[in-house]
Amino acid sequence: MTFTVTDDDTAAAVGSGSLPVLGTPRLLAWLEAATCAALEPTLGAGATSVGTRVALEHTGASPVGQEVEVTASSTYVDGRLHRFTVAARHLGGNGKVVGTGEITRVVVDAERFLSRL
């Protein structure tokens, strides 16, 4: 998936700092979106997934206007549990890697999950 950093994505806007660069919470949301997209074709009727574990290193700054590509690769599946290696890199220029990590999701029945709240 590809995203372009906007003013609404900055650390200053999302409350994770004061600088006008991509905020870590927004980067995490983009990476989680990539894991959801990767799982979507495998989900049955009424199923969805929930995030249960995140390990993320945000290693480079991305200014407003920068295009960022995020990827999610399945590395482990055990029944309903799915683990992904995730990465983010700048598009254009040198393709600098600005984030890496691992996200775990569990497949659940959406209706049953919500009924337990």
Image: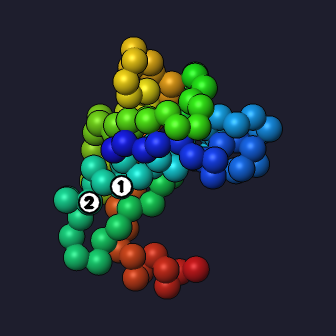
Task: Residue 45: name its quadrant.
Answer: bottom left
- The CA span between labels 1 and 2 is 6 Å
Q: Which residue is mark 2?
A: 40
Q: Residue at x 80, y 38 (%)?
A: 18
Image quadrant in which the N terminus is located: top left
What is the three-letter code of the residue carrying label 2? Glu
What is the three-letter code of the residue carrying label 1? Cys
- Assign a secondary structure to mark 2: helix
Q: Are marks 1 and 2 in contact (CB under 8 Å)?
A: yes
Mark 2 Cα within 10 Å, few/some/many (few <14, many 20+)?
few
Image quadrant in which the C terminus is located: bottom right
Residue 106 in percent (x, y) is at 39, 56
Q: Which residue is mark 1?
A: 36
Residue 15 lies left or right of residue 6; in this view the side is right
Q: Residue furthest top?
A: 94
Residue 13 in percent (x, y) is at 71, 50
Q: Residue at x 60, y 26 (%)?
A: 61
